[in-house]
Image (spheres, rainbow, N blue to C red):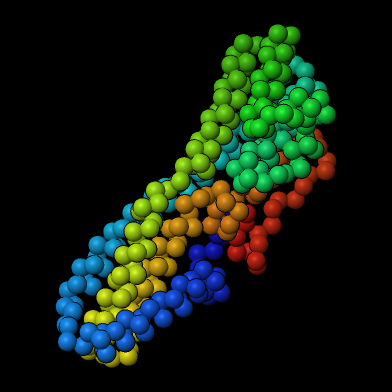
């Protein structure tokens, strides 16, 4: 997640340099075509004006939809943060078996790392740090490790209830938290596995290219070679805005604009370890590239 309000010039150029070069070449081609091939055809200025207005609506729709996906993902993980703290607090304060409560809290940290790794399609060895050898063996053959860990949590919660280590009210409260974790996991998977409609992105990019060509050819008749520069400017504005929205469409990817799962998971880890009196507390995730973003 980006932490600064302003992007560095380096980051902007790194995102757009390939498209910039292609646009400049396309603008030169459009200028040459209008000047030497279609010199007798006059393109009305109203054409790029109306086209630009229509494309702006396309870009705005794409960006709004992308931000909605990003914000929903951030909201889901904000809920996981709150529920994780409640999980630890209730187990520490109300479970009559401190050893089992500690085990369930550590296991929950393993659940968070397993869920993060699943969403990012990576493998995180931290999961093994917080699960017992018996737990690791019991979930070894499961494809979806986070769900398997929740099954273990439900089993131990039932054990606390059967042994009268928690009353019925606390059982229902803790069981609801497990259901909340399962719901957050499912919502996160839905965002990860649902592809943004390809046609929206494809046609938006196509229409921007057409706008760049038409704008350059329209200006070539009045300002000559300068039309290449102004055609690029128009294209840069639209493409940069569109790329900004595209960067938010997959909020769980390991990219600077994505939801900072590493930082969120580490924050929960620190909170829960402090709740059970751990002394070796890991440091918070540091910001990358001179404090520009966290992952």
Q: Is residue 176 visible?
A: yes
Position of 35 with respect to 263 (left or right) is left
Quarter of the image where the N terminus is located:
bottom right
Q: Position of residue 125 (x, y in %)?
A: 76, 43
Q: Position of residue 44 (x, y in %)?
A: 16, 78
Between 40 and 117, the residue placed more toward the observer is: 40
Picture quadrant where residue 211 is located? bottom left
Picture quadrant where residue 14 is located? bottom right
Position of 76 with respect to 52 (left or right) is right
Between 154 and 3, the residue placed more toward the observer is: 154
Q: Vertical placement of 59 versus 177: above or below?
A: below
Residue drawn at 20 percent across, 68 percent down: 50
How many numbered dots are placed on residues in this image? 0
Specify the farthest residue to the front.
Answer: 37
Residue drawn at 62 percent across, 21 percent down: 174
Residue drawn at 69 percent across, 17 percent down: 155
Residue drawn at 40 percent across, 68 percent down: 239
Q: Position of residue 29 (x, y in %)?
A: 35, 82
Between 123 and 284, the residue placed more toward the observer is: 123
Q: Is residue 271 visible?
A: no
Q: Position of residue 226 (x, y in %)?
A: 33, 89
Picture quadrant where residue 41 is located? bottom left
Quarter of the image where the C terminus is located:
bottom right
Q: Vertical placement of 150 versus 16: above or below?
A: above
């Amino acid at each position: 997640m980006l932490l600064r309000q302003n992007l560095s010039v380096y980051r902007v150029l790194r995102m757009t340099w390939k498209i910039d070069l292609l646009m400049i070449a396309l603008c030169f081609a459009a200028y040459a075509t209008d000047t030497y091939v279609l010199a007798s055809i006059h393109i009305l200025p109203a054409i790029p004006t109306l086209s630009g207005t229509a494309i702006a609506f396309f870009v705005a729709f794409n960006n709004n939809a992308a931000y909605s996906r990003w914000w929903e993902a951030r909201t889901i993980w904000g809920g996981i943060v709150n529920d994780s703290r409640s999980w630890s607090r209730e187990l520490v304060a109300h479970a009559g078996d401190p050893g089992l409560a500690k085990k369930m809290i550590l296991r929950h940290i393993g659940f968070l790392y397993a869920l993060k790794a699943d969403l990012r399609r990576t493998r995180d060895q931290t999961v093994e740090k917080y699960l017992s050898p018996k737990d690791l063996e019991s979930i070894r053959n499961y494809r979806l490790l986070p769900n398997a860990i929740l099954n273990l949590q439900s089993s131990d919660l039932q054990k606390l209830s059967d042994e009268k280590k928690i009353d019925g009210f606390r059982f229902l409260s803790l069981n609801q938290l497990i259901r909340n974790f399962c719901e957050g996991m499912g919502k996160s998977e839905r965002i990860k596995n649902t592809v943004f409609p390809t046609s929206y992105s494809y046609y938006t990019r196509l229409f921007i290219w057409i706008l760049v060509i038409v704008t350059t050819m329209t200006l070539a008749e009045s300002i000559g070679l300068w039309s290449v520069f102004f055609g690029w400017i128009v294209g840069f504005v639209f493409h940069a805005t569109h790329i900004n929205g595209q960067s938010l469409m997959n909020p769980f990817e390991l990219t600077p604009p994505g939801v900072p799962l590493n930082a969120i998971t580490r924050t929960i880890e620190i909170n829960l370890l402090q709740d059970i009196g751990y002394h070796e507390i890991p440091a918070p995730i540091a910001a990358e590239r001179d404090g520009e973003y966290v992952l």
